Image (tube, rainbow, N blue to C red):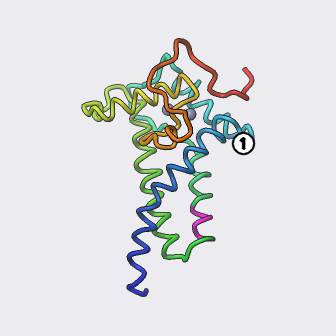
Amino acid sequence: MDAKLWPTILVAALAAPVVIEVAGYFWHRFVEHRGAFGPVFIYRHWQHHEVEYPIDQLRSPHYRDANSWTWYVLLSGIFGAQFVLLPWPHAMAMSLGGFLYGWCVIGVVHSAFHVDGHWLNRFGWFRRLVRLHDIHHWSPANYGILFFGMDRLFGTLREDFPAAKESIFPLARR
Ligand SMILES: [Zn+2]
Ligand SMILES: [Zn+2]
């Protein structure tokens, strides 16, 4: 491969987390909570919110994978688009970066939010993220997991709990 390509390949890998943050925000907010792609995605995410980790039981004592297959769909879509839009070395680098960030970082950290006494709780930044995510389970806010730039941009960042649980699946019938 042409050595001149390496800097731009590196840029593609480093840009991947940004792509995941932006796409992940819209995915979480509009597909998983509002059903932009149909009720199947809402249903899986509703299970995460209301069956696996309802607000009176936001944490379980053991580490469980809190991920869902809906993220495979998002990641596959992003990776597919990269291979259509970019030269393959860049698409490969961006997909690898996206996988490491989206699956190995976001997925693992989100699962850790839902573990009682997880070792990461010794860090203040982690406890802050857990609180923001708990607020997400209470109200239609904080769609980010690690970063909340998109929530800030679109006015969905919330730092305090609501007085009572709010509707977080506006279209779902009970
Ligand atoms: Zn959610
Ligand atoms: Zn959660």
Which sits in the foreground, 7 or 42? 7
Residue 151, given in percent of the width and then of the height, sits at 51, 38
Residue 58 lies, with reference to residue 32, above or below; the image says: above
Residue 76 inside the magenta-drawn segment: no
Residue 79 lies, with reference to residue 37, above or below; the image says: below
Q: Amino acid at mark 1?
A: Ala
Residue 74 lies, with reference to residue 139, above or below; the image says: below
| Quarter that holds the C terminus | top right
Find residue 154 and report its image quarter: top right
Q: Secondary structure at mark 1?
A: loop
Q: In the rendered structure, which segment of residues is drawn in magenta?
A: 79-84
Residue 1 lies, with reference to residue 23, above or below; the image says: below
Residue 121, given in percent of the width and then of the height, sits at 29, 30
Tell me: 41 left or right of 114.
right
Which sits in the foreground, 17 or 55? 17
Residue furthest out toward the top:
163
* Few, some or many residues within 10 Å of mark 1 (<14, 14–19, 20+): some
* Residue at image coords 36%, 25%: 116
Residue 61, given in percent of the width and then of the height, sits at 38, 25
Circle 1 sits on which residue? 36
Find residue 2 and report its image quarter: bottom left
Residue furthest out toward the left:
122
